[in-house]
Image (spheres, rainbow, N blue to C red):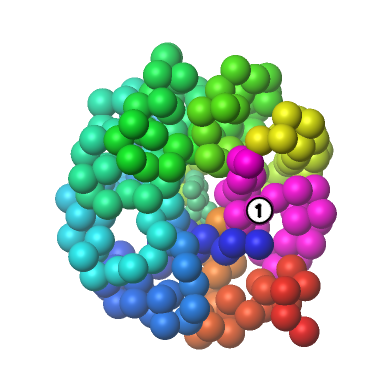
């Protein structure tokens, strides 16, 4: 299991300190939720903020774009320091082109699906991605309840990936907490995003351990 804490639930006034606290607590990934007030109702931050924090952090920057027509900003997020760039299948018309462009720019490519979007939207782009993000809440806000129908979606996707022998990670985002970790991993998830269930329970090293214990990684 890779745990990717979502900064959406951190203290935005202390972003630099929060990032170093994550690093000190032994985390390796961090999840950035970019929102435009149009694709989702909320607004967060964009490339300038990420750029300023990039030089202060060695964490793997997992950038989740919840913006319309993300193809307009791929190079900007590469320049800002994104390691993994995730676009929503619902947000870009020429999805294959967008994903191929992310890789051409030197980043890992991810595709996200809203809860109501079928896995079949990804049938023809699975060769073009390093990760699929299955949303387990409707995107826009932290602290929402996990949608249980996600388990079935993960199971089916894991079967498709295994059948095609594709080295694609499955990431789950929304309402993840230590209580649903076991079931998510059992269904085939690899990367778990957690906002409120992580940041609301400092110290971060201890919270990481709670997640890892739930995952059976440590005793
Ligand atoms: C929701 C975001 C999530 C959010 C998850 O739109 O994509 O990354 O931060 O927050 P929790 O873990 O609180 O559901
Ligand atoms: Zn997210």
> 80 or 202, which lies in front?
80
* Residue at which label 1 appears: 190
Q: Please report the residue visible at 44 percent of the width from the left and 33 percent of the height from the top.
A: 87
Residue 33 visible in the shown view: no
Q: Is residue 143 above or below residue 86?
A: below
> 108 or 213, which lies in front?
108
Residue 100's x, y, as percent?
A: 41, 26
Q: Please report the residue visible at 43 percent of the width from the left and 75 percent of the height from the top.
A: 22
Residue 9's x, y, as percent?
A: 44, 63
Q: Quadrant of the C terminus?
A: bottom right
Extent of the magenta region: 167-192
Secondary element at tag 1: loop
- Locate residue 204 relative to residue 214 in the image: left or right: left
Residue 11's x, y, as percent?
A: 35, 69
State which quadrant residue 163 falls in: top right
Q: Is residue 77 above or below residue 50?
A: above
Residue 28 visible in the shown view: yes
Q: Quadrant of the N terminus?
A: bottom right
Residue 164's x, y, as percent?
A: 73, 29
């Amino acid at each position: 299991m890779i745990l990717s804490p979502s900064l959406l639930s951190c203290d935005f006034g202390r972003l630099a300190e929060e990032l170093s606290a994550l690093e000190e607590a032994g985390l390796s990934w961090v999840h950035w939720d970019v929102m435009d007030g149009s694709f989702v109702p909320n607004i967060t931050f964009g490339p300038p903020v990420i750029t300023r924090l990039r030089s202060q952090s060695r964490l793997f920057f997992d950038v989740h774009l919840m913006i319309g027509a993300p193809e307009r900003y791929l190079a900007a997020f590469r320049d800002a320091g994104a390691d993994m760039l995730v676009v929503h299948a619902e947000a870009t018309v020429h999805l294959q082109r967008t994903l191929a462009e992310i890789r051409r720019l030197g980043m890992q490519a991810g595709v996200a699906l809203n809860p109501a979007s079928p896995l079949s939207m990804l049938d023809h782009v699975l060769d073009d991605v390093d990760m699929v993000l299955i949303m387990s809440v409707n995107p826009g806000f932290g602290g929402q309840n996990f949608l249980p129908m996600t388990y079935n979606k993960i199971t089916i996707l894991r079967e498709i990936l295994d059948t095609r022998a594709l080295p694609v990670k499955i990431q789950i985002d929304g309402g993840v907490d230590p209580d649903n970790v076991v079931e998510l991993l059992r269904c085939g998830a690899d990367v778990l995003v957690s906002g409120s269930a992580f940041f609301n329970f400092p110290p971060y090293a201890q919270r990481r351990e709670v997640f890892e214990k739930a995952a059976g990684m440590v005793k």
